[in-house]
Image (cartoon, grey):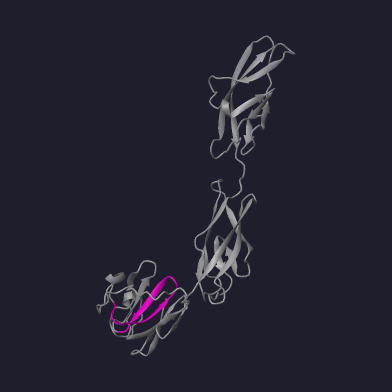
Amino acid sequence: MSATSINENKSTGTTVGTLDTTDDDSGDTHIYSLISGTGSTDNASFSISGSSLLTAASFSYETKSFYSIRIRSTDSSGATYEEAFTITVNNANETPTDIALSATSVPENQSSGTTVGTLSTTDVDSGDSHTYSLVSGSGNFSISGSSLLTAASFDYETTTSYSITIRTSDSSGSTFDEAFTISITNLGTQQGGAIQGDTTSFSGVVTTYAGDGTSATTDGTGTAAQFKVPARVTTDGTNLFVTESSGHVIRKIVISSGVVTTLAGDGTGTTTDGTGTAVQFNALSGVTTDGTSLCGVEASGRVIRKIQ
């Protein structure tokens, strides 16, 4: 047979190779057929037309890389000869089929160069490498390696979302494009201890989100938590940050779950720098965030503290 391999993904009816018979009877004619016997496992995946071996299916290297067939040659007098062949499927590069982005939102007021999310590609060619580029949206975003970054500082009140198109290119240059919508998270503004934002969806229904009314500093979820004179609150869009003026701590509430933890402060009413619960605050009366750090105001300590 002139060839015993074929590239994957070829259409049904593609020629694998041409059959030829060695026969001492010079000039004798031969017909060919697929025959059952040793090595005939995959006969059904092929056909014969004249002296050409053809595919009877489209093959995928990733599914199966070789096929076993058995062919009979019959001469003009009816004498036969049979032989088994192994047909190899060659791996061909395939185009990527999907792009995933680990996150599609970013808080407003972040500095240019903030990471939005990490890109990854779905590709049947396992182990292939990919590079990423922006087809559209380069004025507001950039890509570094597999990270989508901001190229500006966004304001929720100006624009709440941006549409971009990202291209993934594999090592052979095959590409796939996908559109994404990047949402800008509203951080709100703190005025008089309240978060001022879009109130159009408020219905006036009031529920207790966290705390049980006991004046104490106790971590927990929802009404299992306790606060000691909560004074001010701010948000980064994912968490709430609450100051306790008498508890001398800053509490963190995960908005999605209501889980309350103590972010910083040990409850002692003095001014001491440190990390986490090794910090001490003196009568916290205000807090705000720029999305990167918290700033707390100490009424009795007469200082402004920065928490990162």
> What residue sits 56% from the left and 35% below the top?
65
Q: Is residue 226 above or below residue 303?
A: above
Residue 14: x and y, percent? 66, 33
Residue 58: x and y, percent? 60, 36
Residue 36: x and y, percent? 55, 20
> What residue sits 67% from the left and 28% below the top?
17
Look at the image and tell me in which quarter the C terminus lies.
bottom left
Look at the image and tell me in which quarter the N terminus lies.
top right
Residue most extreme to the right: 27
In the image, taking residue 307 as reference, residue 211 lies left or right, namely left
Q: Is residue 279 above or below residue 302?
A: above
Please count the marks in the image. Answer: 0
Query: Which residues are drawn in magenta?
Result: 227-245
Secondary structure character of the magenta stretch overall: strand
Asked if residue 123 can be seen in this view, the reply is yes
Q: Quadrant of residue 151?
A: bottom right
Residue 307: x and y, percent? 40, 78
Tell whether position 66 is magenta: no
Q: Quadrant of residue 239?
A: bottom left
Q: Is residue 173 above or below residue 292?
A: above
In the image, taking residue 30 as reference, residue 96 lies left or right, namely left
Asked if residue 219 can be seen in this view, the reply is no
